[in-house]
Amino acid sequence: MRLLIVEDHPILADGLITALKGSDYAVDHADSGEQADHMLAAQHYDAVILDIGLPRLDGYEVLRRMRRRGSKTPVLMLTARDALEDRVKGLDLGADDYLTKPYDLPELEARVRALIRRGQSGGGAELVHGQLALDTAGRRATIRGAPLELSARELGVLEVLMLRVGRVVNKEQLAEQLYGWGEEVGANAIEVCVHRLRKKLEPAGVNVRTIRGLGYLLEKAAHD
Amino acid sequence: MSSRTRTLRRRLLLWVSTPLIALWIISTLIDHDVAKGFVNLNYDRALLDTALDLGRNVRESGNQLYLDLPQPVIEMLISGEQGRFYYRADGPDGGYVTGDPDLPDPPVESLEDRVTYYNAFYRDEPIRAVALRVPVRPGSGKGAILIQVAERTTLRDDFARQIMIRMMIPQGIIVLLSTLTIWFGIGLGLRALTAMRREIENRSHVDLSPIDESAAPAEVQPLVRAMNDLLERLSAALAAQQRFIADAAHQLRTPVAALKTQAEVAMRQAHDGELSATLQQLHTAADHAARLVQQLLTMARAEPGSHRSVMRQPVEIPALARETTEEWVPRALARNIDLGFDDRSSTSTVSADPFLIRELLGNLVDNAIQYTPAGGHVTVRVRTENGRTVLEVEDDGPGIPQGERDKVFERFYRIPGGSPEGCGLGLAIVREIAQGHGATVVANAGAGDQGTRMTVTFSPPD
C-alpha cells in the first residue's frame, strides 16, 4: 500500500509519516502543492492525505488537477478550517473524506484504512474486528476462522455495527437495514436480535454495548 | 427611574406652563383694574347726581347761603346703597354752609375744574368723593359754591373684586386645560421615542444592526444616525476582534495537530513505563490545547460582531441533541462513563444556529464527562415545559457547591479543588450561546440532590 502525505508543516508531516510507516504503509511526502501535483502525475498511490492550506498551489487545486487527470485515488482532506462551505467545496471537488485538525491519530488511521478498502473493492469486502471477521459478499461470519452461526437478521445487524465500529448505531438505522431484507421489524424484534447476537459474539471477546436512549455500539477491540 | 430625573416631558411642560401661569396672573391684575374703572364710572355718576341736586338747592338770603331742602329730602338724597353719603357745602369765600364739616378738602390742583373726583380718607376709612363747583348766581361774578359728596369705597372694592374673581376662574380653567393638553400632547409626540426605546431594549446583545431611522421623528433622526454610526463602528471593531481570534485559533490548529500526532507516535514507540506515562501526559495536554482552540473558535462565533451570529434557522432540538449525544458516546465510553439520551419532548422546533447549539450541548456534555468519575452516568434530556423547549444535561458526579453555581459560567473560572482538565471556557461559551439565542442556562443539583443538572430553557416560539 502506497500513501502520499501532502502537508507543509514539517513536524506534523513527520509524525504522520512515522505513524503510517509503523502500520506498514509505504509513505511518500510532499510539502507543497506543486510537488504533490508532480508526484501524483508520475506515481500511483492507494490513498492521499491532502492538506488544504498549502503555499501557492492549495489542496483544492491539487485535488482538481488530480480528478481532471481521471485519477480515482481516494483522498482524505485535512483542514484547519471547519466551516461547512469548506467541507462542501472539498467533497464537491471529489474528496472522499474530510478531517479537521487537530484529529485523533487512530481516527485518521481508521479513515485511511476505510478509504483504501473502498478504493480496492467494488462493494463486498471483508470486515475485521479483533478475532471476528465478516465476509459481506459471502454473508459469512467467523471467529478465529471458525464459522459462526448467525441468522440473516443477526448478520444484517452485525454488518451495520461493524461498518460503524466505535460509533453509535441507533434503532432506526438497524430497522432500516433489516427492512431492506424484506422484513418489517419493531423495536422489540431489534432488542431480541441484538441480545442473541451479543451472546454469540461473547467467545470473540467483542461486546455490543447498549447506549441508553440512543442504540447500540460495537466496542473497539483492545488491539485494533 | 427616580422622580428627580428630568424627563423631556416635564421640562417642556415647565417651560410652557410657567409663562402661562404668569400670563394668567398679569391678566387677573388687568381684569381687576378694568373692573374697578367700570365700577367707579357707575358709582361716580350717583355721587355727581346727588352733588348736582344739592347744588341746585343752595339759596342766597342776604349774605347768608343755605340749603333750601327739607331734612327728609336731604336724607333721601344722601342715602346710598351702603349707608349714607357724606356731604359738605362751602361758600365762595370758603365759609362752611352745611353738611359734614370735617370732610377733607378736594386736592388743590382741582380748583379750576367744575367737577373733580378724588380719593381720600375720612374717619380712617378710604372714601371716594366728587367736588362740584356751582356759581352762586350765574353771571353775577359772585364766585362759586363748592359741593362735596363722598362715600366709603368698600362696596366698590367688593364689586370690583367679584368681577375679577369671576373672570379669573374661567381663565384659570383655560390655563389648566392648556397644561393638560400640552402634557398629553408631549406624551403623544414622544410615543415615537418610546417605540424606539422598546425596540432597543428588546434587542439581543448580539444584535448590532442599525436602528430604524425612518420611524424616528425628524428632530431625533440626527441622534439615531449618530447612534447607528456608533453601532456600525462598534460592530466593525468587534468583527475585527472576532476575526483575529478565529484566525489565531485556526493558525494554532496545525501545530497542535503536530504536537498530538508526535505524542501519539512517541507513545507507541516508547517501551519504558516512565517515559510512556510522561508521553501520555504530553498527549493529554495536547488534547486540552486542541479543545481550547476549538472553544476559542466557538466563542468567537457566538459573540456579537460575528457573521455567524445571525445564521438562524428552524432547528429540531430533539434530533440535534440526539445526534450530538451520539457523537460524544465514544469519548464517554473511553472514560468509562454511561452517556445516555432521554427524549421527553413533544416536537420542539426552535429558531437557532444549529452549529452553535451543537457546540452548546457538546460543551455541557464535555463538562459533565470531565467532572464525573469513572462508572458515573451522564444523561442528555429534552423536555417541553409550558411550550418552551428545555435541554438538560445531568450527571451523578460530585456536583457544584451552591455558592459556585453562578460562577461556573464565568470565563476561565474553575471550581476550587475541581478537575484540572477543564480550560474554564466551556460553560462561558454555553452561556454566551444561550444568551445569543434568548435562552437561559442555570446550574442545579441533579436528581436526589446529587451531581449537577444544567438546564437550558429556550424562549417559546413566536
Image (cartoon, rainbow, N blue to C red):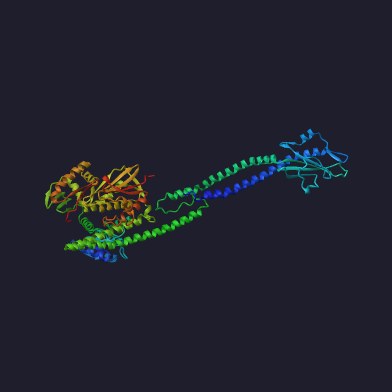
Q: Residue furthest top?
A: B72
Camera-nearest residue between B394 and B360: B394
Q: Is residue B86 visible?
A: yes
Name which residue lies at 83% across and 36% down: B68
Residue A42 visible to the viewer? no
| Residue at the (29%, 43%) spot, across then down | B344
The location of residue B183, given as percent across then percent down, is 54, 45
Q: Is residue A22 left or right of residue B162?
A: left
Q: Quadrant of residue B77?
A: top right
Q: Residue B318 in the image: x percent, y percent?
A: 30, 46
**Split into 4 quadrants, where in the image is the C terminus of chain B?**
top left
Toward the viewer: B437 or A26?
B437
- Who is closer to the viewer here, B143 or A94? B143
Percent x, y of residue B340: 25, 47
Q: Is residue A169 above or below residue B50?
A: below
Q: Is residue B149 left or right of residue B288?
A: right
Percent from the top left, x then y, of residue B353? Answer: 35, 51
Q: How many marks?
A: 0
